[in-house]
Image (cartoon, rainbow, N blue to C red):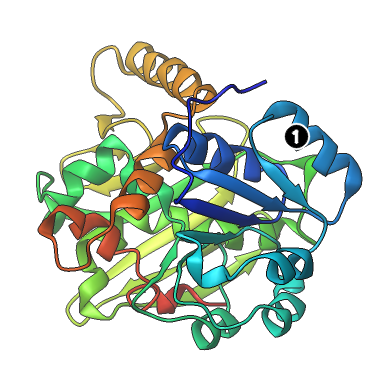
Amino acid sequence: MFISSSSDSNKIHLIIGGGYVSEFHIRASLANKFRVFVVEIDLPKRMYLKYLFPNIFVYSSIKKVIDEFDLNTFELISILIPIHYRKDLYKELPAVNSKVLLEKPITSQCLKKFNHNTTFICLNQAYNKAGFLINKSLFDNKSIQKISTSRPNPKNLLRQNTLSDYLFDYLPHTLTPLHLIYGNEKPSIKIKKTKEEKISGLFLTGEREIPFEVSISENDFDTFIHTSKGKYSYDNSLLEKNSNLYKFKKNLFTLTNIIKNQWGYSTMYNLYYDLKNYLPDSEKFNLLNKLLIKSCSYFAQ
């Protein structure tokens, strides 16, 4: 059970979708003192979320929320449902002026539906320590030769139709460090090979072609930035893979992140903090501006 401090009643956050990933969004929202409304059609899930987070308000349909509230008075709307359910949702959801956060992946329907100046993609790992360092140009970007991600086989927990779909869903995370560097150069993605347990391709800008791959692995689950100087862990503060005490430091970072996630103070917390306080013309929100849908349209499936 997660007990939050008092919320700001005038800052309402509507979360559409109450699956597993919603728990991370709810924790981060409550930690940022949002008043949280959740729409979830499945009764057992609603009951479970209400048990975990007694301070939230749960609804069985978006229609019930629309009938009771003006969505334009909400500070933020997060859409977490799978992409194959979004078409029907978008028909029911009116045009809104509120800020919108779209969980990965996104589709061309998302690009057509929402305001490109107030809609963001949930690349929350842009807010980890490595993301901050890269965003502040404290990493040698010119030496990057390749990006690779290793993911565990979800087996019976697979939520997608195939393993390759699972890897495609993870692709935006893999490319987050490149997006932070080259997102304003109108990049594109070229998929070269698609196999059941591996996808690979090129991240293209006007001047560069950087190979990437996402694959199933038995160990070493991480996203690595391969450079001429070494292999750096994006998920673990740019630790160099062959450095002294790498395993010890990585385990320490992992433990710290688990504790932060449980209390809501995670990369998601930092993302929601910026979303709550966002001022589009302020340099303070330079990182969040890179997550605007108009900068991330090349991720659309």
Residue 77 vertical placement versus 52 (above, below):
below
Q: Position of residue 245 (x, y in %)?
A: 29, 12
Q: Residue at x 27, y 35 (%)?
A: 129
- The number of numbered discs placed on residues in the rendered structure image is 1
Q: Position of residue 224 (x, y in %)?
A: 36, 43
> Which residue is farthest bottom?
112
Q: Position of residue 268 (x, y in %)?
A: 44, 42
Q: Residue at x 30, y 63 (%)?
A: 179
- Taking the image as shown, residue 289 lies to the left or right of residue 12, namely left
Disc 1 packing (10 Å; few <14; some 14–19; many ≥20): some
Q: Position of residue 188 (x, y in %)?
A: 36, 79
Q: Amino acid at mark 1?
A: Lys
Q: Residue at x 58, y 45 (%)?
A: 36
Which of the image's four quarters has the C terminus?
bottom right
Q: Which residue is mark 1?
A: 50
> Which residue is farthest right?
43
Residue 160 vertical placement versus 109 (above, below):
above
127 and 3: which is toward the camera: 3
Quarter occupied by residue 128: top left
8 and 197: which is toward the camera: 8
Quarter occupied by residue 265: top left
Q: Is residue 198 visible?
A: no
Q: Secondary structure at mark 1?
A: helix
- Taking the image as shown, residue 29 lies to the left or right of residue 147, namely right
Residue 33 vertical placement versus 51 (above, below):
below
Q: Is residue 68 visible?
A: yes
Residue 84 vertical placement versus 223 (above, below):
below
282 and 143: which is toward the camera: 282
Which of the image's four quarters has the N terminus?
top right
